Amino acid sequence: MTADAPTLVLGSGIAGLTAGLELARRGVSVEVLEAAPVVGGRTSSFVDERGRDVDTGLHVVADHYVNLLELLASVRASKRLIWVRKHTYLRDGRPPMEWYFSPWRPPLHLVRPVREMPLRSRERLASAFAALEIASRTQSDLDELDHLSYRAWHDRYRLGEGFALELAAAASDAATFLTVDKASARAVLSWMKYLMRHQHAGDVGLFAGSLDECLTRPLVDAIKALGGVVRTGVAATGFRFEGRRIAGVEVAEAASGKVVNRADGVVPGLAPSRRVLPAERVVSALPVQALRAILTPAQATDAGLSDAMRLDTTPAMSAIIWFDRAIRPVPEGAPLCTGCAFRDFIDLSVLGRTGPDAPGSVYQFVITRADSRVDDTDEQIIADVHADLGRVWPGAADARPVDAAVERIGAAMFAAVPGAHQLRPRVRSAVGGLYVAGDWVRHDANASMEGAALSGRLAASALLEDLGRPGVVICTPPDQTVVPALRQLRRRWSA
Ligand SMILES: Cc1cc2nc3c(=O)[nH]c(=O)nc-3n(C[C@H](O)[C@H](O)[C@H](O)COP(=O)(O)OP(=O)(O)OC[C@H]3O[C@@H](n4cnc5c(N)ncnc54)[C@H](O)[C@@H]3O)c2cc1C
C-alpha cells in the first residue's frame, strides 16, 4: 500500500473534516464527499426555504473539549470563541438563578454550586459524597456502569428527588438529549466527571458568528490548502469490498437545483446514475443511521459492524424566534432551563448574529427530548417555546414573535441508553482499509463535537498506523483535582 492512493472520507461533519485534515497534514491525498449541499452536517449553516440564514442548532463548547479546541487553534479559529463563565439558570415556577463555579482547584471549585443548591442537609451530604465518587472514577470504571440507567444509579446513592435530580436531568440532557430514566449512567456520569475534575468546568465557549464561519469553513479551507478536495452534493450509496478489503464506494450526485439542507444527511433528489469511485482506503464519517442505510447486512458482518448497526438514535429540534422588541435584560452566558419546552437558548445578538433589520431580539432554542413532539406543527412548537420563555424569563413576557423557524433533526444523536456503549464500534473495521468515525463510534467522549473530533483523529491515526506511519497525538482532558498530585506523591514515597 502507498500513501499516494486516494483516500475517501464520507461525510463532512466535524468527524469527517477532522479525519480529512489530519490525513492531509500527513501527506495523504484526501477527498471528502458530502451528500448535503453544504458542509458541516449537524454543525452546518445554511439558507432555509424562506431565504433565512440559520445554523443547525445552538452549539456550545466545553472546557474539556481538548481535541476540538486544539484543532480549532491549529486552524486559527479559536479566536472566534467567546468564553462565558456565569450562566442564567431558569426553572419553571422559581426565580432565575446565577450559575457558576468557584475559582479554585477541584474539588474546591464546587464550593459555590454546592452552597447555592437548594438541598436538604442529608441530600447535600449524599451529593458531595457522590461527587467525590464520580471524580475519582476512571473512564473504564464508568464504562462498567453502562448497563444501568442514570436514574438507577441516582437511586442507588439515595440522592433524592430534589435539586440534585434536577441538575442530573440537565446533565443527562446535555450529554445524551435523553431523560435520566432513559440515559445510561455511563453517559451521564462521564459528563459529570469532567464537571467535577475541571476548574473551569462551568466555562462555555460560544461561537461568535455562524458555525460555517467559526468552525467548518476554517477546517475545509485548511484541507484545501493542503491539496485535499471537499465535494458537496455527492452521496455515498454503497460500498464495494474485494474479499476482506475495501475496493470502492458507490456514489450518486444530488440533482442540480435548489436542494434543501438536512442536518441528518437525508438528501432528496439524488441522480439515478451511480458511479463507483475506486478506493483503497475509506473513512466513513457518516452518522450511524446513514451508514446503516448503505451497508448491506453481509458487509456489516464482514466489517464487524453488525452490533453497531443496532444503535438507535434520538431526535432534537432547533427553533429560532424573531421578536418584535428587544428583550431586556439579556440573560447571562449560555442560559439553561429545566422544566420547559426548550433546554437552552441564546440571544443571537450575543454572538453578533442579529441582522441590522431585526426589529427586536432573536433567540435560538435547542429542543431536546423531542421524540414526543415529532407530530407537533411548527406553530405548536413555537407557541410552547414562547409561552415557557415568558414564564421563566420575565423580560420576555410581553415580547411577540414576528417570525420563526423550526429545524427538525430526526437523528440528533445516537441514543446513549443502557447497553449502547458496548455496541459502539472501534474506528478500525474488520475490512482492510475501512475505518469509521463519528460522534457515535467508541471513544471516551459522549456524542458531541468533541466526540466527533476525537473520532476523526482516532480514525486518521489508525489509518496512518496501518500505512506504517506515526499516528495522531490524541489529547486527553487533564484531571485537575488533587488526586494526580497525591498519586505522584505516593509513587515518590514508595520509590
Ligand atoms: C440541535 C443540536 C444541538 C447540539 N448542540 C451541541 C452542543 O452544544 N455541543 C456539542 O458538543 N454537541 C452538540 N450537538 C451534537 C453535535 O452536533 C454532534 O455530536 C456532532 O456535530 C456530530 O458530528 P459528526 O461529524 O459525527 O456527524 P455529522 O455532523 O452528522 O456529520 C455526518 C455527515 O455525513 C453526511 N452524510 C450522511 N449521509 C451521507 C452519505 N450517504 N454520503 C455522504 N455524506 C453523507 C451528513 O450530511 C453529514 O454532513 C448538537 C446536535 C444538535 C442536533
Image: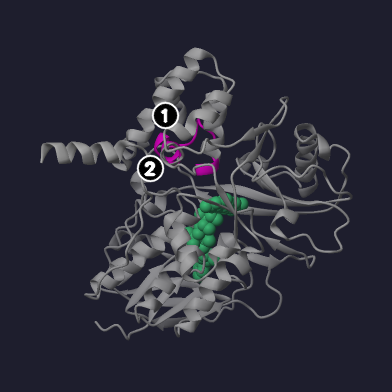
Is the image coloured rainbow, by chain, by secondary structure, or in one colour? Answer: one colour
Tell me where the magenta segment starts and ends, as one range.
174-192
Q: Is residue 181 magenta?
A: yes
What amino acid type is highlighted by mark number 1? Answer: Ala
* Residue in front for this viewpoint, 19 or 438: 19
- For the residue pair 396 and 264, the one nearer the viewer reads as 396
Where does label 1 land, which residue? 131
Disc with the residue nearer the chain's start (2 vs 1): 1
- Secondary structure at badge 2 equals loop
Q: Position of residue 407 (x, y in %)?
A: 69, 55
Instruction: Give the foreground label among 2 and 1.
Output: 2
Q: Which residue is at 71% across, 75% downward?
A: 258
Residue 272 lies in quadrant:
bottom right
Provide residue 218's location: percent of width, then percent of height: 55, 72
> Local crowd at mark 2 within 10 Å, few (<14), some, or many (≥20)?
some
The residue indicated by pointer 2 is: 480
From this viewpoint, is residue 292 visible?
Answer: no
176 above or below 227?
Answer: above
Marks 2 and 1 sit apart, C-alpha to C-alpha, by 14 Å
| Numbered tag placed on residue 275 in the rendering | none
At numbered mark 1, what does the secondary structure look like: helix, strand or loop?
A: helix
Q: Position of residue 183 (x, y in %)?
A: 47, 36
Q: Above or below — where is 94 with respect to 282?
A: above
Q: Alpha-carbon neighbours of circle 1 within 10 Å: few (<14), some, or many (≥20)?
A: some
Image quadrant in which the N terminus is located: bottom left
Quadrant in which the C terminus appears? top left
Q: Nearer the viewer, residue 178 or 122?
A: 122
The kind of residue on which mark 2 rests is Gln
